[in-house]
Image: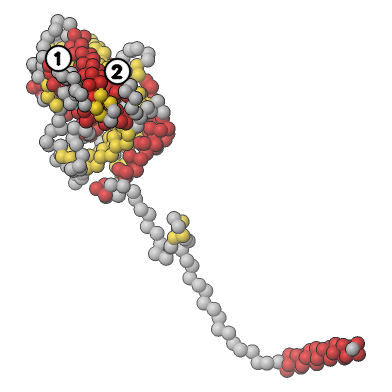
Amino acid sequence: MTTDRYIAAIEISSSKIVGAIGKLSATGELNVIALEKDKIVEYVRYGIIQNVEEVNTALSRIINRLNQKTCLNKRLIKAVYVGISGRSLRNIPYEVNRNLPEDTEINEQIVSQIKEEVLRANIDSSLEVIQAVPRSYFIDKSETKSPIGSMGNNIRGSFDIIACRQQIRRNLAKMFHEKTKIEIKDYIVTPLAVADLVLSNEEKRLGCMLVDMGAEVTTVSIYRNGNLNYLATLPLGSRNITRDITTLNVLEERAEEIKTSSGNAIAAETVSPLNIGGIKLSDVQNLVAARSEEIVANIIKQLTYAEPDGKQLPGGVIAVGGGFKLNGMTQLLEQQSLLKVRLGKVPEYIRLEDTNASKMEYIQVISLLHAASKLDDNNCLITPVQEELPAETGYVGNNPLPPSTPATPEKPVVPKKPSRFKDLGAKIIQLITRDDADDDLISKDNNN
């Protein structure tokens, strides 16, 4: 009998850690049943953990809060899927060419061996291969997306290697294995997971650009002909705008509030005379618009890097991430890129049981759950087995008492007959004691 499985995922970004648990039914339906987040500031920079201890403290809080959710029915997290993202993430085109005996039928083993060779590719020593994404295969120069079953003498695989700095995975492994004692089930490349969740097959085939704007980095992924064509992370995000506002002599927390309530990515046509707590609104508008234009210009520049011939993207731009909460940011990107822009969203077939949570806010970690749901052996929770104790065993605090042993029945006491010698001895002692007491009294009288 097939039972429900529970999947746990963790996404660590520059501004927060988010944990989620999904319930996967026997029919493959994914319900997101628990979400938790904890803010972190300055401890993660551009996707790389700078302070393992502080991040681990926040992570432990999230794990504990998730474990206490009643919807888990006393299950506990034993393993998690962890998202990989950040400034150093990039794609590297790579090809593998293999000659085969005449009229060889391409089977799953041959394709797996080619993919393993890509994962062992010798690239920049500072980078680590995370995933190998196939673009297409060529069997005797004929292109195909599904090589298994084809006949040929030669197979050539075209891949995108997804790589990042070695420090990213090393710090994650140290924190989970040594600190929280939780197993990392697998690493999932977050931009790829988000693309699989929010992009339609039609958009990928036509050509589209996925833009994920976070606090400190903006990830740009370009798809063509159904495949990833380009991936880059920019060291710019919505926090750059917040920090610009702090130059008006306000703390970052206050600057974030001002940006959210009064900022607009599109420059104002008129100068506002209003003040916000002693700060000129016009100064805020100038700072927000200037930085927003810089971020958008860098996003659009990636089109040139990916397609030097300047091809357009009929599928348009799909925008996700907290950076697009800023008023006017989506419109600014549409104006400058001359492409249609839509906000990415979680498909309706994925249910979010926490009605107070926003799918847009948690889209990255939900995409990790969605990606993990397609993998084998993806159950991440366990039900603790409680040992049965003997019926007469109790507890002192958390320590069980040893089982009580049956008492040995006492022998009946038979009364003894009084001894004549014992009575005679008692009388002699009384006489001696009385004589001694009389002597003391006589002695006192004589002294007087």
Q: Considering the numbered disc 2 on the image, is that residue within a helix, a strand or a loop? A: loop
The residue type indicated by label 1 comes to Gln
Classify residue 25 by image quadrant: top left
Q: Tell me if residue 118 can be seen.
A: yes
How many neighbours does mark 1 have within 10 angstroms: few (below 14), some (14-19), or many (20 or more)? few
Image-based side of 97 in relation to 76, left or right: left
Q: Is residue 394 above or below residue 56?
A: below
Q: Residue at x 82, y 89 (%)?
A: 437
Image-based side of 54 in relation to 139, left or right: right
Q: Which mark is residue 336?
A: 1
Quarter in which the C terminus is drawn: bottom right
Q: How is the image coloured?
A: secondary structure
The residue type indicated by label 2 comes to Pro
Label whose residue precedes the other's in the sequence (2 or 1)? 2
Q: Considering the numbered disc 1 on the image, is that residue within a helix, a strand or a loop? A: helix
Residue 249's x, y, as percent? 34, 25
* Residue occupying the far front of the picture: 273
Q: Residue at x 55, y 84 (%)?
A: 412
- The Cα–Cα distance between marks 2 and 1, rounded to whole angstroms, is 20 Å
Q: Tell me if residue 432 can be seen.
A: no
* Near-viewer residue (100 or 327): 327
* Near-viewer residue (201 or 151): 201
Q: Residue at x 12, y 18 (%)?
A: 334
Report which residue position mark 2 lands on.
Answer: 235
Residue 147's x, y, as percent? 15, 18
Image-based side of 200 in relation to 380, left or right: left
Residue 135's x, y, as percent? 18, 16
- Tell me the mark number nearer the camera, choosing from 2 and 1: 1
